[in-house]
Image (cartoon, coloured by chain):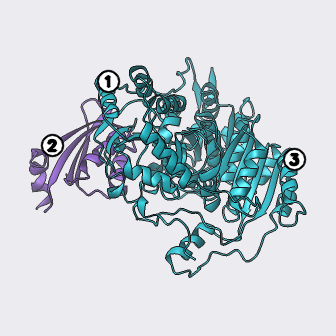
Chain colours: A cyan, B purple
């Protein structure tokens, strides 16, 4: 069978099980778009290439499968960069395929030529510049295998236009790329963990997104229950535990509760499961868990000892490790420690004001969650609204939560929410955003409307870059610099102009009723919610400080 | 002069491998004092010899280098390894 390079690319993607691709055509990837017309793969045209990367992330985060984005050369490839870097820091399996100028013109500063290989190199797990049509047969399955194996991550493939146009005779198809088998814990590893847990009085679990990537959330919660061990979770792993679970203390770190901070000070054993001891989680690391021995279980060997030297480490599959521990360890009750944790949780809980007014972020989040129900995928952008959501949203299943953690990219939310709405149309795709973040990729409202997605955007609008305002208030003597959006956009009208439904609680006679009505309106909906600009996210650990030195609330 | 170590890398021999290795050292701010690279007898593979600083971050940078897809094996040698010593005459004339 004789086919073109472009047809070969599309066929190999079909064989990988890809059914949707987000992207934008341009001069250097036109052959791929021509071949796409003969495929069942659904293409989602974006209005900015950055969104193609985030839509792919949105799909990958809710499904756990690798997702694909397309862009042309030059400015299209540079536009993709932020979304791919974001996938690298949060370990998301994305395969980015870019067109490149023809091989003979490489290095001549040709029109829309840029060194995509060089640009993608430091922000991907691996990347390629394809040199021959035959290479595609190896590179594309290998890219998927790399993206999915071990600790997942993005892979970029740059393909010159002449290679897309060349012809090749295919006799036999390569096997689709899959995740490589994971390293398994030894019986000595399991025995050592068992022994350390048994001799601990006050053990704590620190749960990271590695648990979600290993599809081991259920086992982790089971182990916590069986051994009566409380848990803190990292920002990305919030949905591992059902929010109201008695052993779940919620997020640790910069905006974690004082209860987590005290419990981590007191614990004598910390079990880090699929975590990388990020600075936003640990605070000043030399003062993190000062009394504790540390067990670190992670699939990425380079994370072990990178920031926190463990007492004992297992570089193996967290799922197998948990299953073996579940089998080997009898159930336990830690009456004193359990009671202490419940006391701390109750004493330092985040209080939602009883007045219920929607201008209060916690009231708003609780009421949205109640109306939206459990069959949702929840997204945020980056800022105060993101931290409020992380603190109180009642998650109830793994992969329900999708947010930009490591890179902290404002603009992530809308395209990622589009991705999850495309991947799981039976669930409501819910996005909490801010007036700072939403404008960064607001053009994608047009994309969402085109596909008539079940997407609800709750815009927490304080007419400020709120988290910047907060840091200036707390750490720069209240000198506010460049944080106010004085030219107030009418976001409901913007949504309407782009074909979505727009609601504004600022002018609603009965905000609760309007919120209810808006969330029950089919299709793409944006709800503008005015939030007091003086609202801050508390507690807060000052950047660089130890978690125990958190600020509980603003001194009056 | 800071303490040195010599790293011997077996890598896949194709364009881009050197960029991946050099880029990793540069972005992790780890000093690379010398580099040699030649294809092996089996042209599918190359050897890269690196002369690097030996400080407390060396173990982490080796772990990171090990994660590069094109790097197949890493051996760590003491800085007194003859490979760079024998080449000194080409650089001091």
Seen at 64% across and 42% down, the residue is A395
Image quarter in which the C terminus of chain A is found: bottom right
* Residue on which disc 1 sits: A186
Seen at 78% across and 69% down, the residue is A489
Task: Provide the chain ID for the residue under circle 2.
Answer: B
Choose the circle earlier in sequence order: 1 or 3. 1
Percent of width and height locating residue A129? 49, 43
Question: Residue B88 lies in what quarter of the image?
Answer: bottom left
Q: CA distance from mark 2 to mark 3?
A: 67 Å
Task: Provide the chain ID for the residue under circle 3.
Answer: A
Seen at 56% across and 38% down, the residue is A241
Residue neighbourhood size for the residue with mark 1, other residues' Cα within 10 Å, grouped as few (<14), some (14–19), many (≥20): few
Q: CA distance from mark 1 to mark 3?
A: 53 Å
| Tag 1 and tag 3, C-beta contact below 8 Å | no
Nearer mark to the viewer, of 2 and 1: 1
Image quarter in which the N terminus of chain A is found: top right
Task: Classify residue B37 as left or right of residue A545.
Answer: left
Helix, strand or loop at label 3? It is: loop
* Residue on which disc 3 sits: A521
Observer-nearest of A368 and B92: A368
Seen at 58% across and 55% down, the residue is A74
Percent of width and height locating residue A324? 41, 22
Task: Classify residue B48 as left or right of residue A98.
Answer: left
Task: Classify residue A467 as left or right of residue A25.
Answer: left
Observer-nearest of B44 and A284: A284
Q: Number of labelled discs?
A: 3
* Residue on which disc 2 sits: B77
Observer-nearest of A339 and A380: A339
Q: CA distance from mark 2 to mark 1?
A: 29 Å
């Amino acid at each position: 069978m004789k086919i073109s390079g472009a047809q070969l690319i599309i066929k190999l993607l079909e064989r990988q099980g890809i059914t949707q691709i987000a992207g934008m055509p341009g001069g250097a990837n036109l052959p791929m778009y021509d071949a796409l017309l003969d495929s069942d793969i659904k293409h989602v045209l974006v209005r900015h290439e950055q969104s193609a990367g985030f839509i792919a992330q949105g799909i990958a985060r809710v499904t756990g499968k690798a997702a694909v984005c397309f862009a042309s050369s030059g400015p299209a490839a540079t536009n993709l960069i932020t979304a791919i870097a974001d996938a690298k820091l949060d370990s998301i399996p994305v395969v980015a395929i870019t067109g490149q100028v023809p091989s003979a013109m490489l290095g001549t500063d040709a029109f829309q030529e840029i060194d995509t290989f060089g640009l993608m190199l430091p922000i991907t797990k691996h990347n390629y510049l394809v040199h021959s049509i035959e290479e595609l047969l190896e590179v594309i399955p290998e890219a998927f295998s790399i993206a999915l194996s071990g600790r997942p991550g993005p892979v970029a493939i740059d393909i010159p236009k002449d290679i897309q146009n060349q012809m090749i005779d295919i006799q036999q198809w390569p096997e689709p790329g899959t995740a490589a088998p994971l390293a398994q814990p030894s019986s000595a590893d399991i025995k050592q963990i068992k022994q350390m847990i048994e001799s601990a009085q006050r053990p704590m679990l620190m749960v990271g997104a590695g648990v979600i990537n290993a599809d081991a959330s259920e086992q982790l919660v089971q182990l916590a229950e069986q051994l009566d061990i409380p848990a803190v979770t990292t920002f990305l792993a919030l949905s591992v535990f059902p929010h109201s679970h008695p052993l779940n203390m919620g997020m640790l770190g910069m905006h974690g509760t004082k209860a987590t901070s005290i419990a981590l000070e007191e614990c004598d054993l910390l079990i880090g499961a699929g975590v990388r001891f990020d600075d936003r989680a640990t605070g000043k690391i030399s003062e993190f868990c000062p009394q504790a021995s540390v067990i670190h279980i992670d699939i990425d060997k380079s994370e072990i000892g990178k920031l926190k030297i463990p007492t004992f480490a297992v570089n193996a599959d967290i799922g197998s490790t948990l299953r073996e521990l579940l089998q080997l360890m009898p159930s336990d009750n830690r009456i004193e420690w359990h009671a202490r944790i419940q006391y701390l949780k109750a004493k330092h809980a985040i209080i939602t004001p009883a007045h219920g007014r929607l201008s209060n972020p916690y009231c708003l989040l609780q009421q949205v969650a109640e109306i939206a129900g459990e069959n949702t995928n929840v997204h945020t952008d980056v800022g105060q609204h993101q931290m409020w959501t992380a603190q109180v949203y009642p998650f109830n299943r793994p992969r329900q939560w999708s947010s930009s953690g490591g890179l902290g990219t404002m603009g992530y939310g809308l395209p990622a929410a589009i991705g999850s709405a495309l991947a799981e149309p039976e669930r409501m795709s819910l996005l909490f955003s801010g007036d700072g973040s939403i404008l960064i990729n607001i053009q994608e409202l047009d994309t969402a409307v085109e596909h008539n997605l079940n997407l609800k955007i709750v815009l927490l609008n304080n007419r400020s870059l709120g988290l910047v305002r907060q840091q200036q208030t707390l750490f720069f003597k209240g000198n506010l610099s460049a944080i106010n959006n004085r030219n107030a956009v009418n976001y409901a009208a913007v949504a309407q102009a782009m074909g979505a439904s727009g609601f504004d609680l600022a002018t609603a006679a009965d905000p609760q009723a309007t919120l209810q009505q808006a969330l029950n309106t089919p299709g793409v909906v944006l709800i503008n919610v005015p939030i007091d600009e003086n609202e801050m996210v508390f507690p807060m650990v000052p950047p660089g400080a130890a978690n125990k030195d958190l600020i509980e609330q603003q001194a009056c | 002069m800071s303490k040195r170590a010599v790293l011997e890398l077996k890598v896949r021999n194709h364009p881009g491998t050197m960029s991946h290795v050099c880029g990793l050292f540069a972005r992790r701010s780890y000093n690379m004092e010398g580099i040699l690279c030649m294809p092996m007898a089996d042209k599918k593979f190359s050897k890269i010899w690196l002369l690097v600083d030996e400080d407390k971050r060396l173990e982490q940078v080796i772990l990171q280098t090990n994660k590069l897809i094109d790097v197949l094996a890493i051996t760590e040698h003491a800085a007194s390894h003859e490979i760079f010593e024998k080449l000194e005459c080409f650089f001091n004339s």
